Image (spheres, rainbow, N blue to C red):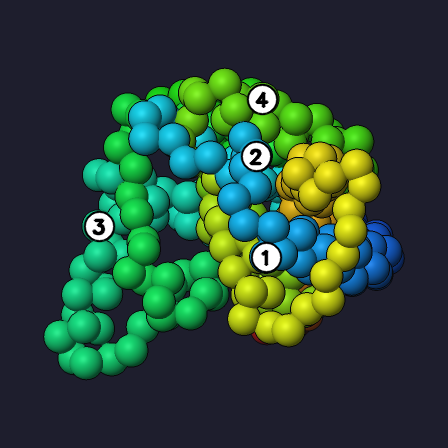
Amino acid sequence: MASLQDIRHRVKSVKSIEQITKAMKMVASARLRRAQMAAVANRPYTEKMYQVIGDIAASNNGLTHPLLEVHDMGRTLFVILSSDKGLAGAYASNVFKEAKIHVTGTAEAENFTLEHEKADKANVSSTFVSGQSSDANKKFVTVDPASLDIISVGRKATEHFKNHGYNIVKSYTDFSERPRYDDARKIASEVMEQFTEGKYKDVYMIYTRFVSAISAVPETVKLLPLENIGKEETQKPSAEYIYEPSAEEVLGFLLPQYFVTMVYAALLQAAASELSSRMTAMSNATDNAQDLMARLDLYYNKVRQANITREITEIVGGAEALK
């Protein structure tokens, strides 16, 4: 049985941890509000830019751009967005699992295939893990790790994939919680340069989409080559515009800007998801610490009562022996 002093030390240490986790929860909660507002504020701009690019592409067939070109040869690039710090629950590990689902030979890819085979046999409609429609399942691809390169954003992704032997060509750190537009521009510029040089035939991004303060979904989206630009707009009536100096030059300017905006939007979503995961994890840790302190207090009182009972028994026994 532990001594009263040992229990007091344990209660003190748990109380210190409870104060830390409570403070981290409050900080994450305050930052989450700002991150959520930034993610929501960026959405209308991204949607409008996509609409403008779609209008240009739909009304001017045959326009070309390096970001639209399909390469038959080349490697595959994953841009993986994770966190710089831990204490965010399963946030980082969920991103890693999502990425490994698309890598041939990994346990995650095998489990994903088995689950979908069972679902198909049971005639159960399944949805692609990224949250897209079931049609996306037909286009689900896996990549040979020998032909895979990774650009990691966040220390956790860098450490994890480097330790597992993956080829990391570039890593970015120190802004996962507070991304700036310049950070997105650096990442996008690096990706566009490598893609236009023909080094990569496909570029995918794995990030976490923010749903709510208690929910975030890891997703895989194809970045390059840009696909389906303007296809939705061709089926809608649209006005004819005159572009100066030309539609091709306007499209050539907007497509890189749109690509940077896509990366920035994903960084904002990932930042909000990280903070919401950290807030939830610290809230659970605070609740667990409070429960543990309550149990330790009860145990402390039991031990103290047992010591008092033992001392009284010894006194009474000694008095009886003196009679």
Disc with the residue nearer the chain's start (3 vs 2): 2
The label number, if any, that marks residue 110 in the structure image: 3
Q: Amino acid at mark 4?
A: Glu
SS category of the residue bearing label 1 = helix
Q: Nearer the viewer, mark 1 or mark 3?
A: 1
Residue 49 screen position, x and y as percent:
73, 53
| Helix, strand or loop for disc 3 | helix
Disc 4: which residue: 193
Q: Quadrant of residue 267?
A: top right
> Could you tell whether 39 is left or right of 232 in the image?
right
Disc nearest the viewer among 4 and 2? 2
> Which quadrant: the C terminus?
bottom right
Cβ–Cβ below 8 Å for labels 1 and 3?
Answer: no
Q: Position of residue 14 (x, y in %)?
A: 70, 53
Residue at image position (16%, 79%) is: 122
For label 1, the residue is 58
Q: Secondary structure at mark 2?
A: loop
Residue type beneath disc 2: His
Residue 172 showing in the rendered view:
no
At 66% from the left edge and 38% from the top edge, which residue is drawn? 248
Given the image, on which type of amino acid does mark 3 rest? Glu
First in sequence, mark 1 or 2: give its number: 1
Please say whether residue 58 is visible from this viewpoint. yes
Q: Which callout, 3 or 4, points at the residue further toward the start of the chain? A: 3
